[in-house]
Amino acid sequence: MALLVQKYGGSSLATPRQIREIAKQIARARSEGTQMVIVVSARGDTTDDLIDLAREVHPEPSQAGREYDALLATGEKESAALLALALLAQGVAAISMTGAQAGIQTDSVHRKARICGFDPAPIRRQLAQGKIVIVAGFQGVDREGQITTLGRGGSDITAAALAAGLGAERCEFFKDVPGFHTADPRHVPTAAVLKALCYDEAMELGSVGAQIIHPRAVELARRYRIPLLIRQTLSEAPGTWIQEVAPMENIHGIRGVVADTRVVKISVIGVPDRPGVAAALFVPLGQARIKTDMIVQNISHEGLSDISFVVAQDEAQEALAIIQEKARSLGAVEVQFDPEIARISIVGGGIASHPEIAGEMFAALASVGINLEMISTSEIKISCIVRQEHAQKALQILHDRFELGKGDAIEN
C-alpha cells in the first residue's frame, strides 16, 4: 500500500471549521487505499501567542532553552489532537503523536535542534492497525529525553524527515498559497505559480526569503529523492512540484525573484588583517546556529580590514551580542548594525550557463537608480543588498526584465 505524508500549516488549521474540512480531505485520500501520515503546525498565531505569554513571566524566555521548547511544543500537540478528534468524529481511525512518540530523535541544541535519527516502528505499528497517524511537527526529543524544537518552519522539516524515513511515495505541503510564485504576488501582480522546480532551486528560493517551504526540508527530500508537492489547502489547483529535474526552463533559466526585508547587515570595522580573525568571528556564530550570508571582507589598508555579513532579523540581536564580544577581544574599531536593508535575489538553474545574466540584473537595477551595497553569487543565485526603501521597485523591475511569469509558469 502506498504511503503519503501530508503537512498542514498553521493558517490551514486556525479554526474548528477548517480542521473539520481538512479532516474530510484526509479521509477522502485514505479511502483510496493510501496509508496516511499527517504533520501539523501550531494553529494560527499560537506560537507567537505562546512566546508573548512566556515574555510576561521571563524577560528573555528563549535563554531558558529547555522550558522554552517545552512550552512552544504544546502548540503542535494541540493541533495534532484536534485533527485526530475531527477524524474520529467522522468515523475514521486516527491517532495523534508527539515528536517523541513518533520516534523523532534530535541533538540537544534547544530552539534550533537538528534531527539526528528516526525510529519508524511506532508509526508503522499504528499504520498497520489501519490508523491515520497525525504527528506534531517542529519537535523531537534528545538522548536525555528532553523536548527540543527545530526552529521556525520546523514542521516542514518534520514532514520531510518522516517521508524519507518511512519511504513515502511523496510529501505534500498544504499552504495558504497555491505554490511557488515567480515573485511575491502581493507586490507583483503579474507573478505566476511555477509548475515545477528542482531541489536546488527550491532550496535557494527558500534561503533568500521565499517563505514557502523550509530549505532544510528540501535538503532532506533531495538527499532521499522524495518528490515534494506544494499545494493550496482545500484547493484543486495543481501546485508546484519539487523534484530532481524540472521539466522545462524559461529562456534565461530564471525561475523567481525574491525581495527579503527581514535581514540586517552587521559590519566589523577595523579588524586586524591576519589569519584566524574571520574564524574568531564566524565560528561562534556557527556554534549558535546563526546562518550568515553575503560575507564580504574588503582590501586591507594599513593592516586593518572590514568584514560585513547579513543575518536574519530574528537572529540579529543574538548575532550582534556575539560579534560585539568577539570584536572587543580582536581590538576592532567598531561594530555597525544596519537594519534598513533588503536582499534582492534572482534564482534559477540557468544562471551558471548564462554569464550575461549578472550584468543584466545590475543594469536593470541601475536603470531605476538603485545602488548595490553587497553582491554574492552562486551557480543558481545572484543576491544584492540594497536600501530597504528600494526593495519593491527592485522586485518589479527584475520580474519585468527577465520576463518571469511566462514559460513553464501557470498564469494567475
Image (cartoon, rainbow, N blue to C red):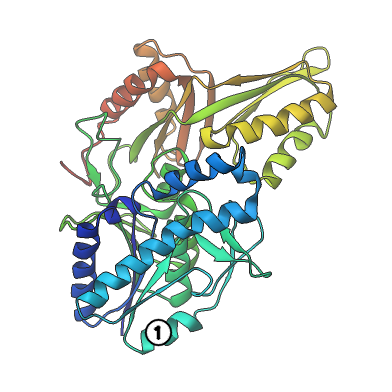
For the view shown, which residue lies furthest in the bottom direction?
A: 129
At x 26% / y 77%, what residue is drawn?
Answer: 88
- Look at the numbered disc 1 and give the secondary structure of its residue: helix
Sort mark 1 into few (<14), some (14-19) or many (20+) by Cα contacts within 10 Å.
Answer: some
Where is residue 121 shown, x and y percent of the image? 50, 84
Name above or below for residue 51 compared with residue 293: below
Q: Is residue 17 left or right of residue 8?
A: left
Q: How many marks?
A: 1
At x 57% / y 43%, what residue is drawn?
Answer: 57
Where is residue 23 shown, x and y percent of the image? 23, 68
At x 42% / y 76%, what residue is drawn?
Answer: 167
Q: Is residue 219 visible?
A: no
Q: Is residue 304 left or right of residue 174?
A: right
Q: Is residue 60 left or right of residue 30?
A: right
Name above or below for residue 392 compared with residue 2: above
Where is residue 313 shown, x and y percent of the image? 52, 32
Which quadrant would residue 35 be assigned to in this image? bottom left
Which quadrant would residue 33 be assigned to in this image? bottom left
Image quarter hosting the N terminus: bottom left
Q: Is residue 8 visible?
A: yes
For the view shown, which residue lies furthest in the top direction?
A: 369
Which quadrant would residue 271 be assigned to in this image? top right
Q: Amino acid at mark 1?
A: Gln
Where is residue 264 shown, x and y percent of the image? 54, 27
Name above or below for residue 138 compared with residue 118: above
Q: Is residue 334 left or right of residue 179?
A: right
Q: Which residue is mark 1?
A: 126
In depth, the one of 39 and 400 nearer the eye is 39
At x 63% / y 56%, what residue is drawn?
Answer: 66
